Amino acid sequence: MTAISDQLRRQIAIRAGHCCEYCHVPIQGQVATFPIDHIIPRTRKGETVLSNLALACPHCNGHKWALVDGVDPSTSQPASLFNPREQVWAEHFAWSAADPVVLEGKTPNGRATIARLLINAPVMITVRRLLLELGIWRD
């Protein structure tokens, strides 16, 4: 485990708007500490530097683990996972018009990320719905 200083953790959280950089669940209202994700995993020579770190909720972090790619369920083709340091979230994701707590992928990267990180798992939809009802969350 790489030590992340409190100062670096604060920088990352502020830059992320205090929410997961993958699914946008906020820190507020959560009981678990949000891990710091190495976008390019250390196992792939990713460094512990601000430009390679992202705030991730425990769910997204646990499913991303040391992975950098997934499969786009629309095409069954491999695609890189969303990189919050190099890509714009709104270009790859959108909240469903039919259900505002369901995340939809707009690109192969977005769809592969949603699938690989299980962002629309029932437990996460429930969390987002409760946070929405409490007025704590919504992009």
Image (cartoon, helix red, strand yellow):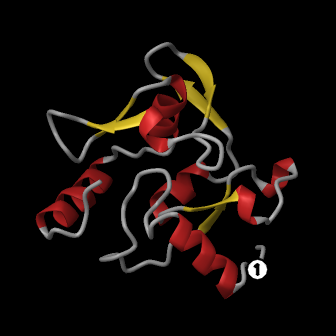
How packed mark 1 is, by other alpha carbons closer than 10 Å (few <14, some 14-19, many 20 or more), is few
Query: Is 45 positioned to the left or the right of 19 in the image?
Result: right
Q: Residue at x 78, y 74 (%)?
A: 2
On the image, the x and y values in percent for residue 75 come to: 49, 13
Residue reaching furthest to the bottom: 6
Query: Is 118 positioned to the left or the right of 88 in the image?
Result: left
Pointer 1 residue: 3
What amino acid type should be assigned to the residue bearing mark 1?
A: Ala
Give the quadrant of the N terminus.
bottom right
Q: Residue at x 14, y 33 (%)?
A: 98
Q: Does 135 appear above or below 75?
A: below
On the image, the x and y values in percent for residue 101 come to: 23, 47
Q: Residue at x 43, y 16 (%)?
A: 74
Query: Is 56 positioned to the left or the right of 127 in the image?
Result: right
In-front residue for pair 7/61: 7
In-front residue for pair 137/72: 137
Q: Does 42 appear above or below 30?
A: above
Q: Residue at x 62, y 68 (%)?
A: 36
On the image, the x and y values in percent for residue 16 come to: 51, 63
Query: Is 115 positioned to the left or the right of 5 in the image?
Result: left
On the image, the x and y values in percent for residue 18 come to: 44, 70
